[in-house]
Amino acid sequence: MAMAWDQNTLRAKFCHALSEMYKSEVPLYGDLIDVVWQADAKAVQASKTLGGAKAINPDDVLPSRHRVERHGAIRLGTAYELSTICRMFSVMGMYPVGYYDLSLAGFPMHATAFRPKTQDALSQHPFRVFTTVLRMELLTENTRILAQKALAQRNIFTPRLLELLDLVEKNATLTPAECAEFIENGLETFRWHSKATVTLDEYMQLTAEHPLIADVVSFPSSHINHLTPRTIDIDLVQQLMVSQGMPAKERIEGPPKRSCPILLRQTSFKALEETVYFRNTFDDYVKGSHTARFGEVEQRGYALTRKGRQLYDQILDRVNVDAAKNKLEGQDYEKVLETHFKAFPDSLSELRDQNLAYFCYRLTSNGEKLAEDGSMMAKFGTKVSVQELLDQNILAYEPLTYEDFLPLSAGGIFNSNLGNVSQSKQLIMSAEPDLDGFQLCLGTCVADEFHLYSEMQDESIQRCKHQLGLEIT
Ligand code: OOG
Ligand code: NI
């Protein structure tokens, strides 16, 4: 009899298989994983020596959640590719969350992240895939025609994968054997192919307009372009990458180092130049090269509310205006970044009081005792505020982790790996975000990430309320 499949297990297995494939394709990625291990071991050791004074999120050092890739990224060309990837990821419990307008950073693309949506699924296996798709309307006409022709000739999904998608949608079950086939066939979509589907001339034309267009359009699959483990000390990883002679990106993207880490900080080693064989007019191949694949590291901080995110965006904007005006780079840029970010509160209580971040609430041991002996009603009546329960040491809170991405940081990662030389820059820079167009290609809606965090926060309050037998206002 057919068995229902477990999405979390399938996602974990797929991520593992993808990681093995990528390590064999890009050996430097394996070296990066070693660097992350070294850095994390050192950070844990340093924290012990300090008597644990340096805060380390216990979730971060749990091997089960931490020692796996947190995300990967792919770039797609058509609505068909995007909607089919959406079907494929949903089998693994990964759903489109968030809309990212990359024209902000000068790229003719927009994106979403396919990821687990619940705290339970995230903690079972957090893997997600940042997925971009070309915006044809932002290409010049000649390039668009060439891109559309090349994309129309490829199918990045194996016939068996497409059958399995139909099957699972019809029956809502997958047998263990079908799950194994799903992984094997699914990997083919992400595999690297050194034989391009275009000629060298066509490749040059695409690259001249934007290297990213060439990366999306020239190959028979949508190769995974990077995988990203999580670290607890990204500054140390950056330092180790440089000292071990890895081709590290110049700077860490995102906010500066703080006592309360917010959102996301990322760095990478730069993409490698790889041999590619381009189609020749006579059905043979000419040798050339392509640069796209790299390895990345991320350190995750707290999820911000819309208000917190607005403040983050405003500050980053000020930093970038300042940096552009004074042509700041390297250490000078870092200093300005740090100075401007002093305007962002850096203590848990301020972040909470000013409604800048999301939190998960739970009962303290004192709260649990009170809940057990049923004396809450007598003490507070039926209605009481969260603040009062915090003041009375009945509730405690901890920040929710940011599970999403940042478009400008993504732009920085793109840039250090591809270069930003666009012939249709005017078109791109004046573009508006196009969420409707994106959702039309996707065939469904993207979830709003703020809504998901706020739901998690509310649910935690509901749980406390239930345990205490109170109405919390
Ligand atoms: C995606 C870059 C975005 C991140 O970590 O921000 C990304 C890409 O290079 O295709 O993965
Ligand atoms: Ni990434």
Image: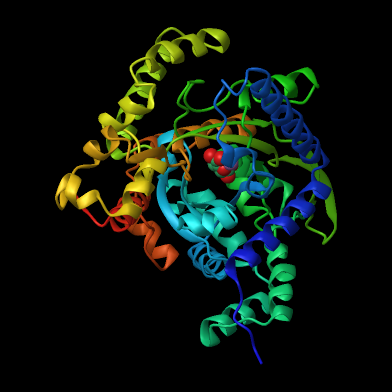
> Residue pushed farthest bottom?
1
Its colouring scheme is: rainbow
The structure residue drawn at horizontal position 75% and vertical position 38%, both measured from the top left corner, is 33
Q: Is residue 85 left or right of residue 397?
A: right
Q: Is residue 447 left or right of residue 278?
A: left
**Residue 390 lies in quadrant:** top left
How far across and down, in percent of the image, does residue 344 sit? 35, 21
How far across and down, in percent of the image, does residue 56 sit? 57, 30
How far across and down, in percent of the image, does residue 95 sit? 47, 61
The structure residue drawn at horizontal position 54% and vertical position 69%, both measured from the top left corner, is 84
Which residue is at the front of the view, 388 or 369?
Answer: 369
Q: Quadrant of ligand 2?
A: top right
Which residue is at the front of the view, 173 or 424?
Answer: 173
How far across and down, in percent of the image, does residue 462 sit? 30, 55
**Residue 267 lies in quadrant:** top right
The quarter of the image holding the N terminus is bottom right
Residue 459 visible at all? no
Which residue is at the front of the view, 286 or 243?
Answer: 243
Residue 120 visible at all? yes
Q: Is residue 121 above or below residue 332?
A: below
Disc tally is 0
The structure residue drawn at horizontal position 74% and vertical position 24%, both measured from the top left corner, is 241
Which residue is at the front of the view, 116 or 47?
Answer: 47
Q: Is residue 155 above or below residue 37?
A: below
